[in-house]
Amino acid sequence: MKIVVCVKQVPATESKLTISSEGADIDRSGLSFIVNPYDEFAVEEALQIKERLGTGEVTILSLRPHSAQKPEEALRTCLAMGADKAILLNDPAFEGGDGFTTATVLAAAFRRLSFDLLLLGKQAVDDDGGAVGIQVAELLGIPHVAVVNKLEIHAEARTAVAHRQIEGGIEVVETPLPALLTCQKGLNEPRYPSLPGIMKAKQKPLEIWNRETIGLAPETIGAAGAKLRVVRLEPPPPRPAGRIIPGEAATAVKELVRLLREEAKLI
């Protein structure tokens, strides 16, 4: 079973974000970056599948979306967790793109790999787009199941049974392999890299592929190929100060209901 997991390096969730001087992106200088939390579920699931089957290979793939980021750190973290090898997609032509160009690059990279299963997080916590996995599956022409929180792999039958939570119940989907699945919280509990794993990760292969490696024309990727363009980013307006309604409880409640109905328009 050959499993490829795509991970993205994102700003740490506790980071204080500011808008860059150009106004169309965040200021990435001084930020700390981590593996996208939903991608950690994908990595852990790949490792557990390999352990259950007793055979297989787990490859981690990541794209450098911005020159200020260092996805090598995220890849080494995944290798320390137990992945076998890693590939970094690194080329200035990849920068400035959108979800579609990201999917285009990833799909081209996947075509160069032999795989039975592709695993991604359901979304990245920086832009919360949630569309890249779906687009990759469409470009590759393979089945796709989104937001999976339980997974069964039947290697001999070459099928996967994915469970996904929907409103009012659980949806169970069976799909032939190869397939692409996006992973949700609750699928597993990601492990921490061990000290021996960290030491072994330094010796595991980390390949670097550029635009020429995956055979893409520069006008189809990055800013040149993007379908969407961010015009401007603005911080949310500051929250107004709270109001204290004086008086007895019964009177204050009536006034609160009136304000919620007439001013806030919430009821």
Image (tube, rainbow, N blue to C red):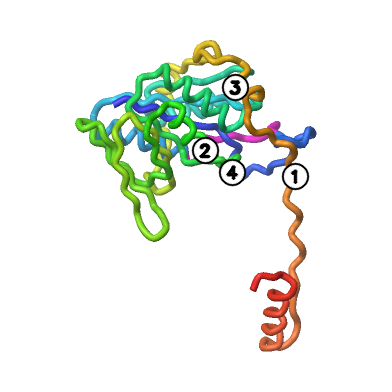
Please tell me the numbered disc located at residue 234.
1
Q: Secondary structure at mark 3?
A: loop
Specify which label sits upstream in the sequence, 1 or 4. 4
Q: Secondary structure at mark 1?
A: loop
Residue 196 seen in render: no
* Mark 2, residue position: 131
Which residue occupies the foreground of this view, 176 or 189?
Answer: 176
Please tell me the numbered disc located at residue 13.
4
* Mark 3, residue position: 221
For discs 2 and 1, the disc positioned in front in the rendered view: 2
Q: Secondary structure at mark 4?
A: loop
- Mark 1: amino acid: Glu
Which residue occupies the foreground of this view, 123 or 145?
Answer: 145
Specify which label sits upstream in the sequence, 2 or 1. 2
Residue sitting at x 42%, y 19%:
111
Above or below, 164 against 21 in this view is: below
Specify which label sits upstream in the sequence, 4 or 3. 4
- Report the span colored magenta: 28-38
- Mark 3: amino acid: Ile
What is the distance, in whole Å, between disc 1 and disc 4 at their CAs?
Answer: 19 Å
What is the distance, in whole Å, between disc 2 and disc 4 at their CAs?
Answer: 20 Å
For discs 1 and 4, the disc positioned in front in the rendered view: 1
Residues under numbered marks 4 and 3 in contact, where contact means CB atoms less than 8 Å apart: no
Q: Secondary structure at mark 2?
A: loop
In this view, the residue farthest toward the right is 21
